Amino acid sequence: MLRIGAAIGFALVVTASAFAASATPASVLDRTYSCRVRPEHYVDVNTSVTLPPEQGYPRPAQLWLDTVHKTQLIGGLHAVVAQVRFEAAKNSLSVDKSLCRSSSREVALDPARIPLYATATPDRFGQIDARCATSKRVLVRFRIRLTAGKPVRALFAIRNDSAKRKPVEFVRWSPTKITGYLGKSCTDTS
């Protein structure tokens, strides 16, 4: 009888441990920043869904906001540094705090009056890239849902950081589907 009880107890511990290991913590990051824009007053937003590997290299879904042209020497090459960036990889969120400061200004996480531009999936387009004319600063708000530190969904809004806070662009992002809303000041650069 003791052996059966021990076996059942062991099975319960193994099952509970397996369940605990498979449960991944989820969290949400909700932040707003005011970012300086290049003298020509435009930003570039580049998004992509996860695509099949190319020449053995993974191509995870990503979102980049480039408000100024900033480069960094990496491995002997000049690489563009985004002011806000994340991809479908653990701990990938980065914000360039030398150009973007935390803001308490309200930015709605919806498309407002911006028309739907396109939806990208791995089978259709794969990416949505846009260049948008802006004021000298933009408000950027994002809400990113993370599972085990990896972005799985995001809402991303850009507005002019001026008195009217005119909507510029809005993106609903996931590794398998991106829906982009582009304002009148934006053009497709895909």
Image: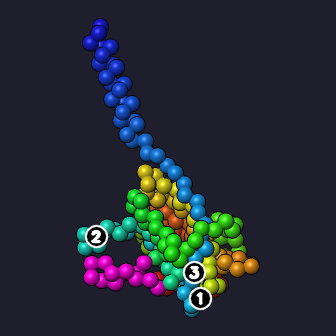
Residue furthest out toward the front? 98
Q: Quickly name the residue at label 3.
A: 36
Q: Is residue 1 left or right of 173 when viewed as pictured? A: left
Residue 166 is at least partly visible in this image: no
Q: Are marks 2 and 1 in contact (CB under 8 Å)?
A: no
The secondary structure that most of the magenta stretch takes on is strand
Q: Amino acid at mark 3?
A: Arg
Residue 103 drawn at (x, y percent)? 63, 68
Q: Say what amino acid the circle numbered 2 marks.
A: Tyr
Mark 3 vs mark 1: which is more N-terminal? Answer: 3
Q: Dot 2: few (<14), some (14–19), or many (≥20) neighbours within 10 Å?
A: few
Pick whichever, 87 or 30, lies toward us.
Answer: 30
| Secondary element at tag 3 | strand
Q: Is residue 163 magenta?
A: no
In this figure, which residue is indicated by the disc labeled 1? 41
* Quadrant including the N terminus: top left
Q: Position of residue 84 (x, y in %)?
A: 50, 72
User: Per the image, is 76 magenta?
Assistant: yes
In front: mark 3 or mark 1?
Answer: 3
Q: Are marks 3 and 2 in contact (CB under 8 Å)?
A: no
What is the x, y in percent for residue 171?
57, 70
Q: Residue furthest right?
A: 164
User: Quadrant of residue 123 in the image?
Assistant: bottom left
Q: What residue is shown at x 54% (from left), y 87% (from top)?
A: 38
Q: Which residues are magenta?
A: 69-81
Does residue 32 sit above or below 160 in this rendering?
above
* Residue displayed at 39% across by 41% down: 22
Above or below, comparing residue 117 to residue 21 in the picture:
below
Question: Horizontal placement of 6 versus 64: left or right?
Answer: left
Q: Nearer the viewer, residue 80 or 186?
A: 80
Secondary structure found at label 2 = strand
Q: Which residue is mark 2?
A: 57
